[in-house]
């Protein structure tokens, strides 16, 4: 029997570890950061590494990420994420105990656009550190972690010469090229340093 959720927080009572309001806000911001990079979506399928209530990424966080990805502007306790997605022509489903996952402590969101593009997003959780992050887009490894200073670089081609830190490979989504940069240390002029690099069209700060 399917269960109908009336808000993003309805699932909280069904999980082992209840996510905090901060976790949900961070997951929502992560989805919002992804939204402008994605094509118009038709389907989101969450591949889970356990049952719905025991997945390493709590379902409230999955729904908050989904809310950001489908373009919801504000997430409240009355936001019906699945209904809003449906009104935007996007179906959202959850596959427990998925056989599609290749590593532990991960869930995967399989996205399909209206023009049949497919995108795979892998999210990794670390319960001991109380953290979660986007760690892979299709075959490209990266780190987009809520709470960590991260720069999303819109580029023409692969960038070199960044300050010390972790720079992702060149990633293409929705006819856009970008790279994720996590600096070793944050400086007040870091954004201007990155914007001055060749082939950088824009810099978005994510935290």
Image (spheres, rainbow, N blue to C red):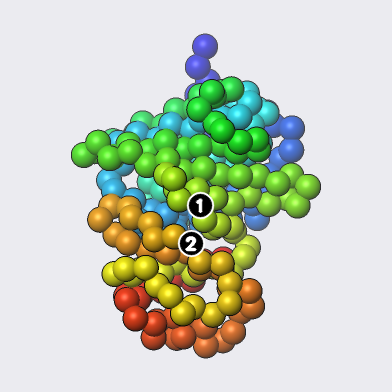
Task: Give x and y (percent) for residue 40.
Answer: 27, 46
Quadrant position of the C terminus in the picture: bottom right
Q: Mark 2 near mark 1, Cβ–Cβ under 8 Å? A: yes
Label 2 and label 1: CA atoms lie apart by 7 Å
Which residue is more in the foreground, 33 or 18?
Answer: 33
Mark 2 crowd level (few <14, some 14–19, many ≥20, 10 Å Cα):
many
Side of 132 where 36 appears, left or right: left
Q: Secondary structure at mark 1?
A: strand
Which tag, 2 or 1, sits closer to the chain's start? 1
Residue 59 is marked as none
Residue at x-position 65% and y-position 44%: 125
Residue 168 is marked as 2
Residue at x-position 33% and y-position 55%: 172
Q: Is residue 193 above or below residue 27?
A: below
Task: Give x and y (percent) for residue 79.
Answer: 48, 43
Task: Give x and y (percent) for residue 113.
Answer: 28, 40
Q: Is residue 13 above or below residue 149?
A: above
Residue 164 seen from this side: yes
Which residue is more in the foreground, 41 or 157?
Answer: 157
Residue on which the image places disc 1:
141
Q: Secondary structure at mark 2?
A: loop
């Amino acid at each position: 029997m399917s269960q109908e959720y009336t808000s993003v927080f309805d699932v909280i009572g069904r999980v082992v570890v209840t996510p905090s309001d901060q976790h949900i806000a961070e997951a929502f911001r992560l989805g919002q950061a992804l939204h402008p990079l994605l094509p118009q979506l038709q389907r989101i399928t969450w591949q889970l590494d356990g049952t719905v209530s025991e997945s390493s990424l709590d379902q409230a966080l999955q729904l908050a990420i989904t809310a950001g990805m489908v373009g919801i502007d504000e997430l409240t306790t009355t936001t019906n994420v699945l209904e809003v997605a449906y009104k935007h022509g996007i179906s959202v489903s959850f596959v427990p105990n998925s056989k599609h996952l290749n590593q532990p402590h991960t869930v995967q969101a399989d996205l399909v656009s209206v023009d049949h593009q497919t995108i795979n997003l892998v999210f990794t959780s670390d319960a001991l550190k109380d953290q979660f992050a986007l760690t892979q887009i299709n075959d490209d490894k990266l780190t987009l972690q809520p709470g960590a200073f991260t720069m999303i670089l819109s580029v023409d081609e692969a960038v070199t010469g960044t300050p010390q830190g972790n720079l992702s490979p060149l990633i293409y989504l929705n006819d856009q090229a970008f790279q994720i940069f996590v600096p070793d240390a944050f400086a007040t002029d870091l954004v201007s340093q990155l914007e001055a690099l060749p082939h950088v069209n824009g810099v978005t700060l994510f935290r």
